[in-house]
């Protein structure tokens, strides 16, 4: 065992490896946001009214230049000895700028730095998820509109139940995703408060300007209580993962339906060949692997959401090292959700509905409720009509499939889908995303003095 | 095994018991909302333009009268033979009103009935949780304000870290609860759409008016896609439980801190005696049972949230009986969260901070960062100041505790807490709750023709 | 708020309700085992060599008589004021026997009492679960044997893959349950150590004989470390629930297969009508509710197992009140698993395989691997044979279904199932259960002086 | 999008990336066991009695030589195009040995290959975990013995409860780990059955000898039902992770105690400095990071166990691609548990108990139960003695601490710990591990024709 000399002291090497864990790897996702945070922090320090000025305008310009250089330096790396992105960036600044680097950590702690980085990362990723989510909703709505009048047996308990349509089926999942937007929006709002300046959770005896850094970084406002800035770590990731978790549940159900109804016994849908794979032993196989993987990845994101929440449950107040363990499930959960939304969107684009097979799926029982309601229209109380039809099931013949669907005209039924309403909803959400994105990128571009895009 | 004859057919008795499960018990929570839903449904049916009128105005009045009677009938009961609240109410209507009762189920299914009931139940409970959550936040803020200048060692890794205050500690948890409001609000918004009229998930061949029922019941709007009305079951409960889950995490951490810092070795806080219990073997014991139970009940609500989400994950589209199993964790999760918020609120009201013990908890190391920042103010780069103080730790003496806290004046630090901002935030939330409540109760009162309160 | 005077002191009534929770109800499951534990404890105390004898033989006989009376007293009840079964029993003894009742709690605490009760309860329930599990395995094997040669398309990715049989399908689930026995056995072994005499987790300054009570109660041995006797609470329940969780996963998959393959599009299996239920709106429906409920109840038992484990994770050593919250998920998890095993066993008994539909499910692609292996037998390397068949898929014709199955003769394949080996395995397990049961009941009968059966 | 030509067909590149996921990386853990499995499979094929011999003895020798070469080839790599370790190995064999490579996949599928690999991997890792677990138990027992008579306040509800000792505290956690052996053993037994020869879950029309491969690979026996060989995937990993999960719960509680009782307010224990780390802002800090990380990693392993279980819950029978997603949580869960056991073992080796601080922790109330039992010995019924002491708490004085501990002499109490019994238990477990290891390594060494060690 050799010892390792880091900025914060001498640590046993094997212990260093254990405590640092996957941070050098995971923190590569945070290089840009960490530098952005440091620019804002340096800017604020340069405005501080102290008897000895911390940073002159020239100092700040030099620091910003170096931080911007790191952002675009493809070779920037985090070593185990650095422990994390924060130390790696501070080392680089000290190497390049000497005294200025040694001053940059004034009035902050790694605790508020990582809290900030994760909120900026969360913000950027949420915008990405929102867009992917909306794209898939659009794709499903397009598929629904194209197959609006194509009949499909509606099922309950997986048993044939009532006449329905491919349009109803597809827009059902689209509406689910649009509904999930409520959760993505509230996760965004929850995340949109700046923890910087909370230091180790107890502030500092300097008159730092937390509103300024919050504003420079495009946050809605700073978190007030500095201890809560620390206590909200893990919770914030957990809130985001919970929202993603619901999206994944949606996707898992869509995937399940696609797996089931592309079985040859149904053949309702054809999953594009390039989204299927073969078998090493069975030459004839074409398997819906992409859908199966999406189905199971839901359990993974659920698990990650659970980990994030459980790490902070019962944790004593103030920073605890336990929080570090949330980084991986957070980033993995985000990455999985994004990749699943993306691939499902492309799959749906090429999905085909097989009209013939869909028609063939109808049998007489499916029309029983329609029949009962015919009696109701003729004046029979529903419960008697129900009993009457129950007694004549074997006599029921197939009604005209198309006609039956055409009769479901009320709001939200197969022929009562208001696609314009859906389009309006989609447009509003797109405008919402665009607004957030341009506002955020504008702020960061101003701060960095160069165009910043996500 | 004997057979049982229900409205929907003859079922083996032991199978009936298995399938019905705890529904007769759980559904007692839904009696009022089920009747409310039926009034709205009957009203809408009475407006329907059919060649044979379903309900005349007099019919509707009779139905409403009977449904209102059920709501206030303390003896109304649900039998296993009824299976659930919906059948129990339909039976009662048929018993009392004959033909009218047999007509009430026209154009709906138990699927959309229970979906509706759970959304109304969810709405009422969310309003209750919001109020309890706000009450506790108020209580904590009051305690914080009363102890604003009382010092308390701030900890990271549970080790003494920096000077802090009881005010900072208490308002930290208050701010956490106020933050959770974002989640409660979005859960409310998610829940605030009406599933009625989706029937079994595929609508009906009648020209029902889903906007009317939605409006009569005080919903923001109807869910559009009827299949999604069915698919959103479980998801909606899961979204609500996720929000409650975060509240419970907050409470578990507050409870953990209270348990730790009321240990005699700290004695920072005195938990009121009436919230402690004794031991059957140790005569001297006075244990923080209430806090311990809250701590563990977090795991329970987490588990219930997990169940709700997992039951619907990968579930094929359309109604599946699996959904029934979500009722119990949903209702239990709500009840636990409410009781924990309520009792914690009362406990905090009588909580005492022991100033002497809190002062005694300070040791010299706690001031090390303050010392380093003094050097910084004198012009030394932070990293050098840090190293210098690290080399003189044994020489550090206790600084003046009060003065040190007084120096933490920036926004959100011990002496930078903006209680007016908190008060404004509390008031806004109170107004929000009051608005929702009065709007909802107004709508339901109009519908029932009598004052309805929650 | 009124106060309530209990054995262990005066507590605020609303706090009492919160802390006692559902214990009075849940503890009704523990009345018999609590009394059994008290008989053993009293017996041990009567053997203690103290300067003042605690219980004479006559005293012990009186105590035992009263405890046995409680076991068979259908009216015995636990009040909220009693808090739990332990206090209720102690009160009753004190009411009936005066001084003797006030002595019974010597050298023990409610902590080791409840730990003991839950281990006895766990033991009895595990024996019950083992038997139910074995019954279902037997039923599935019987169904498998009866349908040994009935063909069924074997699937991977749910797509038709290779020829298989109903026998293979059904015995697959039977073998899964037999495999789970390993977990039930180890849960039993884990549970089979006596915590009595650990008191509050730190023993007592009396020379109590923990080996004696352990032996009287039929345990393998006492837990040694008294603090571990306390720390193992929750863990023991969690271990048992983990085993049940695996059984439920098995059942969920069997239920899923039954739901899928009883859809009319397959019609491979007919679920007996009395295990299906109807719809309130669709007169034609016959739904596999029992299977759906089993499928979803898996998520419930999983959730309960999670709760039990999470409550104890990170809990400081020694008894904490948090443990109380584990009782409900433990008992619920046990009850659900038992009822699902029981009803599935009865359902399988009447399950029918529809040979015609099963034959009709075969298409040519299913035989592709067989074809490739024919080429291999003729000397072609497998990977070439695979490619060759892949190029001639459209030319493949249906091979003889029965013959193809008959060719799968190696160990464990459709025609290589060794039902005698299964029978031997079943018999061994039955003997194992019978042995444990008779040993345990024998010990308890001796202790109580009357026949005790479970 | 470019296409990629693999052994099993042409797949879209972005889809390939999605479906392959982290397999090329994760499968590096399986290279050795995959080759071992292939040697056994080739050996069995070479014994097969076919009209055209598959492998001569020379063929087999050549195949084995190449597979052994791969095992020790540090440069062996798995490309995305290979998809997984199985294809990578098959490619290499085909490259090097031509026709022989194309024959190796005869009579098996990747499904049974990966099932086999994971069971071999699971076996090797379980042996490793068992040893690490035993090492920690030994370390804790050594610490316990060394501090057998050092007093420590025993706590319930974290409040001082009764006199206890450091020896009791430390051996409590040791006994917990020894108890967990039951779960590790049953996981090992569960895992110890060979799935090879099940092919895609439906066997093959060749007379393969599954008992031979099972025996060559050192398994207890082959899984019988070939479909169950497939269905047990995920379940087997879940069973192993459940056992690890309990170990992690143990560790989390030990870590929690160490964190709490090394706070300066207690100072009962000194965590060795090299297992603590500093702060970037607070020069004085020395934090118990290792313990905090272990505490939180429990939640991670729990999450991984949950994922493994949830992926297979409700999954239709037969292989589904979902199973692939279990590999990562399985391997991560194993790696985390091993590293935590290892580092905790080294930490405990250097742990110090601070006798002075431990004595100072006693206050008079701790002796109340002892006092009550003194009255009992003098003839007073316990409940009266309890009440009497409750009434005189303020008069209670500190009893002699050492003497009080010396009075706890019954089995398992502070002075009743039977360290010889612990030693015997440890020795038995060590012999058990050694036996399994030597048996397994012996079998594999014979198979490979070279010494194999783990």
Image: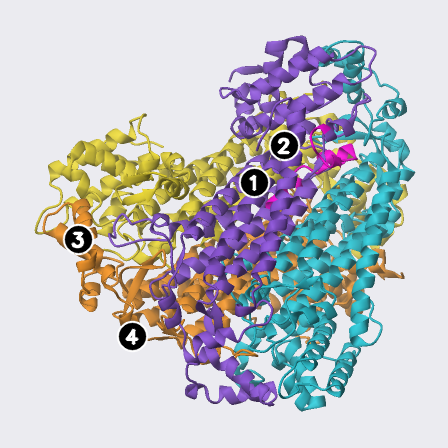
Chain colours: A yellow, B orange, C cyan, D purple
On the question of residue B44 being in view, the answer is no
Foreground mark, 1 or 2, reads 2
Q: Which residue is mark 3?
A: B373
Label 1 sits on a secondary structure element that is helix
Q: Which residue is mark 4?
A: B355
Tag 2 and tag 3, C-beta contact below 8 Å:
no
Q: Is residue C322 above or below residue A67?
A: below
Q: Would residue C29 appear left or right of A121 to someone viewing this image?
A: right
As drawn, the label of residue D441 is: 2
Q: How far across and down, in percent of the image, does residue A143 sit?
A: 59, 30
Quadrant location of the C terminus of chain B in the rendered image: bottom right
Q: Quadrant of residue D323?
A: top right
Asked whether D372 or C408 is in front, the reply is D372
Label 2 sits on a secondary structure element that is helix
On the question of residue B382 being in view, the answer is yes
Determine the CA span between mark 4 and mark 2. 65 Å
Q: Would residue D452 appear left or right of D366 to someone viewing this image?
A: right
Foreground mark, 2 or 3, reads 2
Q: Which residues are magenta?
A: D216-241
Q: Is residue B291 above or below residue D13?
A: below
Determine the CA span between mark 1 and mark 4. 52 Å
Label 3 sits on a secondary structure element that is helix
Determine the CA span between mark 4 and mark 3. 27 Å
Label 4 sits on a secondary structure element that is helix
As drawn, the label of residue D128 is: 1
Asked if both marks, 1 and 4, belong to the same chain, the answer given is: no
């Amino acid at each position: 065992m050799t010892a390792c000399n880091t900025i914060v002291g001498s640590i046993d090497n094997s212990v260093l490896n254990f405590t640092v864990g996957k941070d050098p790897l995971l923190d590569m996702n945070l290089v840009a946001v960490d530098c952005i945070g440091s620019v804002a922090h340096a800017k604020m320090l340069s405005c501080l009214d102290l008897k000895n000025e911390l940073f002159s305008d020239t100092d700040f310009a030099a620091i910003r230049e170096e931080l911007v250089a790191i952002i675009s330096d493809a070779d920037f790396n985090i070593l185990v000895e650095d422990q994390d992105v924060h130390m790696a960036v501070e080392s680089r600044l000290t190497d390049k700028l000497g005294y200025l680097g040694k001053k940059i950590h004034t009035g902050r702690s790694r605790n508020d730095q990582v809290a900030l980085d994760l909120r900026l990362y969360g913000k950027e990723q949420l915008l990405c998820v929102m867009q992917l989510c909306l794209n898939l909703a659009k794709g499903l709505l397009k598929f629904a509109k194209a197959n609006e009048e194509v009949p499909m047996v509606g099922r309950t308990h997986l048993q044939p139940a009532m006449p329905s349509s491919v349009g109803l089926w597809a827009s059902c999942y689209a509406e689910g995703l649009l509904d999930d937007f409520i959760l993505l929006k509230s996760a965004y709002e929850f995340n949109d408060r700046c923890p910087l300046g909370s230091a180790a959770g107890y502030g500092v005896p300097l008159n730092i300007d937390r509103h300024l850094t919050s504003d420079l970084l495009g946050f809605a406002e700073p978190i007030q209580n500095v201890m809560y800035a620390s206590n909200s770590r893990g919770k914030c990731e957990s809130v985001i993962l919970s929202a993603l978790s619901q999206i994944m549940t949606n996707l898992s159900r869509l995937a399940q339906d696609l797996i089931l109804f592309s079985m040859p016994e149904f053949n309702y849908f054809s999953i594009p060949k390039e989204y299927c794979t073969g078998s090493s032993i069975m030459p004839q196989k074409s398997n819906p692997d992409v859908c199966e993987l999406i189905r199971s990845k839901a359990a993974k994101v659920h698990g990650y959401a659970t980990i994030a929440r459980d790490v902070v449950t019962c944790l004593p107040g103030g920073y605890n090292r336990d929080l570090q363990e949330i980084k991986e499930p957070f980033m993995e959960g985000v990455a999985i959700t994004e990749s699943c939304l993306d691939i499902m969107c492309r799959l749906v684009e090429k999905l085909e509905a097989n009209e013939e097979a869909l028609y063939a799926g109808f049998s007489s029982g499916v029309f029983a409720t329609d029949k009962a309601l015919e009696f109701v229209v003729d004046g029979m109380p529903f419960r008697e009509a129900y009993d009457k039809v129950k007694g004549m099931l074997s006599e029921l013949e197939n009604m005209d499939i198309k006609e039956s669907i055409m009769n479901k005209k009320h709001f939200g039924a197969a022929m009562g889908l208001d696609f314009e309403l859906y389009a309006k909803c989609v447009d509003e959400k797109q405008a919402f995303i665009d607004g957030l994105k341009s506002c955020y990128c504008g702020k960061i571009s101003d701060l960095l003095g160069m165009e910043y895009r996500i």
